[in-house]
Amino acid sequence: MSGGVDSSVAAWLLKEQGYDVVGLFMKNWEDEDDGEYCSTRQDWIDVVSVADLIGIDVEAVNFAAEYKDRVFAEFLREYSAGRTPNPDVLCNAEIKFKAFLDHAMSLGAKTIATGHYARVREQDGLFQLLKATDSTKDQSYFLHRLNQAQLSKTLFPLGEIPKTKVREIAAQIGLPNAKKKDSTGICFIGERPFREFLNRYLPTRPGPMKTAEGRIVGEHIGLAFYTFGQRKGIGIGGAKDGSGEPWFVAGKDMASNTLYVVQGHDHLWLLSPALVAGNTSWVAGFAPEAGAVCGAKTRYRQQDAACRFADAGDGRFALHFDEAQWAVTPGQSAVLYQGDVCLGGGIIEQAAVRQDAPQSASLSAVR
């Protein structure tokens, strides 16, 4: 239980269904628990209030050390390498469905449940991770690194309930957090300014900011502080060439410490017809066959993009899209689906640049 409305309603639903429910509140970050940006204290108060109302026991567990070792260290390594990681994906696999699951099992629990919007179905001896029926809230993307053992012990009570209904239930039963705002942003950063946070852990290393043609148009503060497709916070105006088009980050050359920027949302350097991903994980229990037609998300809240699956060797895979995808970002997850079934995915290593894009040996890309 996080203190939010989703996990609170999930706990109430399980209690109503006759389960013996124990609430567990995880503390995963404690470096700056000062209240300005970190809501841990208030979240714990909300958890206790909800538990008291619905009549369940509640316990607080501290996984800050595990989080730092398994999630935050990897987060910093990826940013240092110029990639843009998704720590919430790793947190689910390593903390919420590993450290938390292990702790729950040690208490004698048979299953764990969370307020995620997703579904689990057993079929032919395998457990399937399914999209939530509320497509606007589906969180299967963040859960694709779970394995069969984790999935077999997990319940998602909200998987078939629209978010609007969850709010209605919370209000009807008088939950004290019924109108609490949903949390946003990266889990351990909260609402604090991201660049300011990252600067506390990674050094700035200024370098040139160049266009696709090699023209210098500014200076960046360090490649780790920019992500592919970024528009805000680049630090250059919109009319450097007179077109008035906004600038976007389009590539990084780690060797020369160069940031590449282009103008226009649909610039060719921002469109990728293919990608290669590694560090794969197949929640379905198996990988797709070579040539399989799938739907893929390269970022959360994206519509599934039609693609063909291919083996890229060394445990990696390639995806070839029917239509070029915008700002495919190394470090993010490419997650595969067949209909509502999540198959799994991998971490994007390279994104192909269209053949008719300006050629630059500086851009690390699969051509």
Image (cartoon, rainbow, N blue to C red):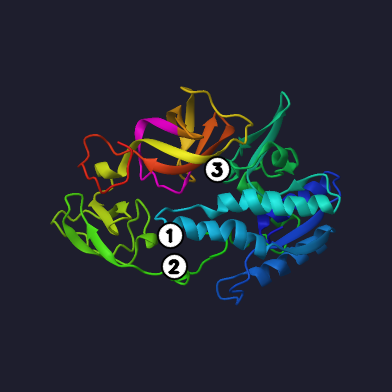
Q: Is residue 36 magenta?
A: no
Residue 244 is situated, as x and y percent measured from the top left of the image, at 18, 56
Q: Mark 2 Cα within 10 Å, few/some/many (few <14, many 20+)?
A: some
Amino acid at dot 3: Tyr
Quadrant for residue 2, please give it: bottom right
Amino acid at dot 1: Ser
For the residue labelled by badge 3, is the local secondary structure a helix, a strand or a loop? helix
Residue 141, disc: 3
**Residue shown at 37%/69% (left/top)?**
204
203 or 352, which is in the foreground? 203
| Tag 2 and tag 1, C-beta contact below 8 Å | yes
Q: Relative to residue 67, is residue 241 drawn left or right? A: left
Residue 202, disc: 2
Which residue carries the number 1 mark?
Answer: 80
> In the image, is residue 119 above or below residue 320?
below
For the residue labelled by badge 2, is the local secondary structure a helix, a strand or a loop? loop
Residue 54 is situated, as x and y percent measured from the top left of the image, at 81, 58
